[in-house]
Image (spheres, rainbow, N blue to C red):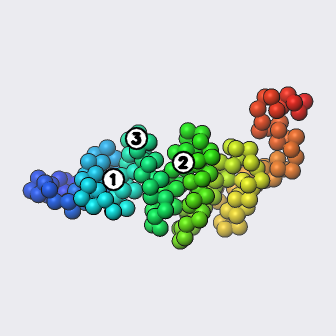
Amino acid sequence: KAIYCFKKCKVIQPENNEVNQLLGSTLFKFQKYRDCLPFLKRVLDENPSNKEILFDMAVAMTECGMGDKALKVFSHLRPDPNYGAQSCLEAGKMHERVKDFTSAVKDYEIALKLQNVPEQILLQIKYRLANTYIAMNDIAKALSYLRQIQLAKPQYKDVDALVARYSELNQNKNLQTYLLSGTSDFVALC
């Protein structure tokens, strides 16, 4: 109903930026990502300092397959006190998808340095960082973050199982080589 009303307002006042913002935000919340982009862009053209709209636009671009543009926006928002942690998380996820683990770690570590990060986002960042370190075969650093998560929120996702599994791997280098390394390392171990 809101979208219908805002579209009527748009017909009456096509240049009203407040209507653009409300229509774009409503379409975004209704997960009509491709439809919301033109309205969010118009709002940003008039007010480029609106971080909320900028973040929503980056999420919409991600959902529409414009990952490179979205990544630039998320990288730009990383130092922001309100949207920085979530932007780092999104940028890190994007880097993980393309197997750029070094950049993903950098994104997550920037987020950990920010002040006043909500606990739920902080737990997600630490969890993603631990999994990234596991993918990089750096079990010791991964365990450090997994244990921090255990202390902050017991029973979070599969952290207990990961700690149990990787604690043993961290102590036994031969087992670690057997389970995690490539073929050449395995042959050398044999």
Q: Nearer the viewer, residue 6 or 97?
A: 97
Task: Please report the residue visible at 55 percent of the width from the left and 70 percent of the height from the top.
Answer: 115
Give the residue number, with chain letter if any, for mark 3. 66
Q: Earlier in the sequence, mark 3 or mark 2?
A: 3
Q: Nearer the viewer, residue 169 or 136?
A: 136
Element at label 3: loop
Q: Quadrant of residue 67?
A: top left
Classify 10 Å Cα crowding around label 2: few (below 14), some (14-19), many (20 and above): many
**Which residue type carries mark 1?**
Phe
**Which residue type carries mark 2?**
Lys
**Which quadrant of the rendered structure holds the C terminus?**
top right
Give the residue number, with chain letter if any, for mark 1. 28
Q: Is residue 19 above or below residue 64?
A: below
**Which residue type carries mark 3?**
Met
Element at label 2: helix
Classify 10 Å Cα crowding around label 3: few (below 14), some (14-19), many (20 and above): few
